[in-house]
Amino acid sequence: MGNYTNPNILDEGNIKAVHKLLQNADIKYQDFSRIKPIKGDFVYFDPPYHPTSDTSFTKYVSGGFTEKEQEKLRDFVLSLIKKGVNVMISNSDTDFINDIYKKHFRIEKIEAPRVVNCKSDKRNPAMEVLITNNY
């Protein structure tokens, strides 16, 4: 889709490097509460992002991923940290997300590119947060 002069959709060197790094990784797509990491593991969570506006797309799952689910994820992550698991969560930079993670986590704000939008003038970077325990 689109009209691109030289799209970089296949970066062979990067794909091979990632392939090598992920040889011992276990990547799963499932409800976060079903995972069973052990001490020393690293777990990355990429939940449906908290909406930044009334028109934000967040309907990745039936019923959406509500603020209650965001808090459930935070509580689950806290239980993992107590077991010695290293975690990272990405999410939108909203007051709600910053508030629920401010107490026990490190929050880094990053500018993330947005290259998918039907309106090219709306493909602007967005502020996001990377949330980690202090490992």
Image: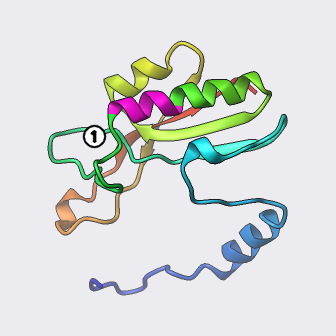
Q: Quadrant of residue 10?
A: bottom right
Q: Can the viewer see residue 40?
A: yes
Q: Which amino acid type is marked by label 1?
A: Pro
Q: Residue at x 20, y 57 (%)?
A: 122
Q: Quadrant of residue 118?
A: bottom left
Q: Is residue 55 left or right of residue 92?
A: left
Q: State the colouring used for the structure image.
A: rainbow
* Vertical comparison of 38 with 16: above or below: above
Q: Quadrant of the C terminus?
A: top right
Q: Residue at x 15, y 47 (%)?
A: 55
Q: Is residue 8 left or right of residue 76?
A: left
* Vertical comparison of 38 with 81: above or below: below
Near-viewer residue (63 or 94): 63
Prevailing SS of the magenta stretch: helix
* Vertical comparison of 10 with 87: above or below: below
Q: Position of residue 42 (x, y in %)?
A: 74, 42
Q: Is residue 107 left or right of residue 61?
A: right
Near-viewer residue (125 or 105): 105
Q: Mark 1 = which residue?
A: 51
Name the element at disc 1: loop
Determine if the magenta segment contains residue 104: no
**Range shown magenta:** 67-73
Q: Position of residue 120 (x, y in %)?
A: 21, 66
Q: Residue at x 33, y 84 (%)?
A: 4
Q: Position of residue 107 (x, y in %)?
A: 53, 26
**Residue at the farthest top position:** 103
Q: Quadrant of the N terminus?
A: bottom left
